């Protein structure tokens, strides 16, 4: 089973819109993949979901911020990274994704963030878009 870490924007896309990201969250719900998350990523997810533009979208999905966060927490394995990574200076928050993935010994980071995607691989962990991950899973 693939071990996967989502960046925050990918989680939000999966929660609020239909598409590849939502399909991957469904795979985690069905235990076809193992999703990992850290407390720092949960906190970031909650903070971003509270932005006005996402609150309206949540209402349309009939979710509260807490319900959306709990959905992810219930399907993900919580991991607390034991070390700091400082590989992405342009956006230090992206390093939290790397810390979670390395600590979880993840196979893949799924992201739409150019800072992460430009790495392509970090410490043996593939970094790819949701679309690329779906294509890889169907091979």
Image (cartoon, helix red, strand yellow):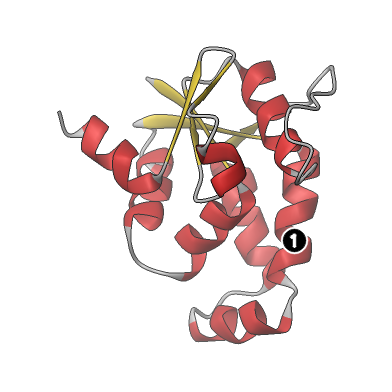
**Picture coordinates of residue 117, whole percent (x, y):** 51, 39
Please give left or right for residue 5 compared with residue 21 in the image: right
Identified at 40% across, 22% down, the residue is 2
**What residue sits 58% from the left and 74% below the top?**
63
The structure residue drawn at horizontal position 74% and vertical position 27%, both measured from the top left corner, is 87
Q: Nearer the viewer, residue 83 or 117?
A: 117
Query: Where is residue 98 shown, x and y percent of the image?
Result: 67, 29
Q: Nearer the viewer, residue 47 or 88?
A: 88
Q: Quadrant of residue 137?
A: top left
Give coordinates of residue 139: x percent, y percent: 15, 28
Give the quadrant of the N terminus: top left
Give the image quarter of residue 54: bottom right
Query: In x, y percent, where is residue 100?
Result: 69, 28
Judged left or right of residue 112, residue 55 is right
Image position of 85 (left or right of 134): right
Crowd class of label 1 (few under 14; some 14 to 19; many from 20; radius 10 Å): some
Looking at the picture, tell me which residue is in the foreground, 30 or 128.
128
Q: Is residue 59 above or below residue 16?
A: below
Q: Secondary structure at mark 1?
A: helix
Q: Which residue is mark 1?
A: 46
């Amino acid at each position: 089973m693939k071990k996967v870490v989502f960046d925050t924007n990918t989680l939000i896309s999966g929660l609020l819109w239909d598409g590849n990201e939502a399909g991957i969250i469904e795979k985690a719900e069905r235990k076809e993949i193992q999703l990992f998350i850290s407390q720092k990523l949960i906190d970031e997810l909650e903070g971003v979901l509270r932005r006005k533009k996402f609150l309206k979208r949540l209402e349309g999905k009939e979710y509260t911020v807490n319900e959306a966060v709990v959905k992810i927490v219930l399907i993900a394995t919580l991991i607390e990274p034991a070390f700091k990574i400082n590989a992405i200076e342009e956006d230090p928050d992206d390093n939290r994704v790397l810390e979670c993935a390395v600590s979880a010994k993840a196979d893949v980071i799924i992201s739409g963030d150019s800072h992460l995607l430009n790495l392509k691989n970090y410490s043996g962990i593939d970094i790819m878009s949701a679309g690329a991950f779906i294509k890889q899973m169907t091979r």
